[in-house]
Image (cartoon, rainbow, N blue to C red):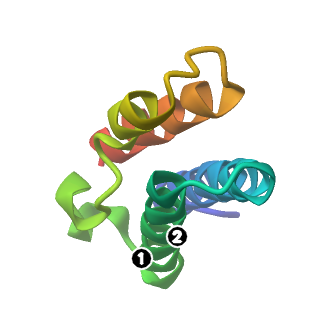
Amino acid sequence: MENKSGNKITELEDQIQKVIVMLEEENHHNPNSMVELLIKRYRNAFDIVEKSKDLSELSPSDFHIIGGTRAYIDSSSNYDNPVLEEMHKTEQLVKKI
């Protein structure tokens, strides 16, 4: 049985991966340097979570994705894009660490 920290790690990994897939799909159809930067940061965040055994050893600033939602909005002005909601969910999970 997975412990509480393990469940949070899995939930965060899944959420980060979901955002990466959405951003990569968007960037494939409409290349954008801001989206490329966000993909890089989300991949790095995924690596951090994947290597971590205990999220309590980490802080939100370790992930470098907080504020990504705002950066995305500023660069695209596409307020209806579903990736915004998923990025916001991810940031909220990271802030709970």
Q: Is residue 75 left or right of residue 46?
A: left
Choose between 32 and 53: the one closer to the eye.
32
The residue tagged 1 is 48
* Residue appearing at x 69%, y 55% in the figure: 27
Q: Is residue 48 left or right of residue 57?
A: right
* Residue appearing at x 44%, y 63% in the figure: 37
Coordinates of residue 87 in the picture (x, y in percent): 52, 38
| Three-letter code, disc 1 | Ile
> Total label count?
2
* Residue appearing at x 35%, y 53% in the figure: 65
Q: Residues within 10 Å of mark 2 (few under 14, many from 20)?
A: many
The residue tagged 2 is 46
Rendered view: 24 above or below 71 = below
Choose between 79 and 3: the one closer to the eye.
79
Coordinates of residue 67 in the picture (x, y in percent): 29, 40
Q: CA distance from mark 1 to mark 2?
A: 5 Å
| Three-letter code, disc 2 | Phe
Coordinates of residue 6 in the picture (x, y in percent): 55, 63
Image quarter hosting the N terminus: bottom right
- As helix, strand or loop, the secondary structure at mark 1 comes to helix
- As helix, strand or loop, the secondary structure at mark 2 comes to helix
Rendered view: 61 above or below 93 = below
Coordinates of residue 59 in the picture (x, y in percent): 20, 59
* Residue appearing at x 53%, y 63% in the figure: 36
Q: Is residue 37 left or right of residue 19?
A: left
Determine contact: label 1, label 2, CB under 8 Å. yes
User: Residue 77, labelled with which disc?
Assistant: none
The answer to which quarter of the image holds residue 54 is: bottom left
Q: Residues within 10 Å of mark 1 (few under 14, many from 20)?
A: some
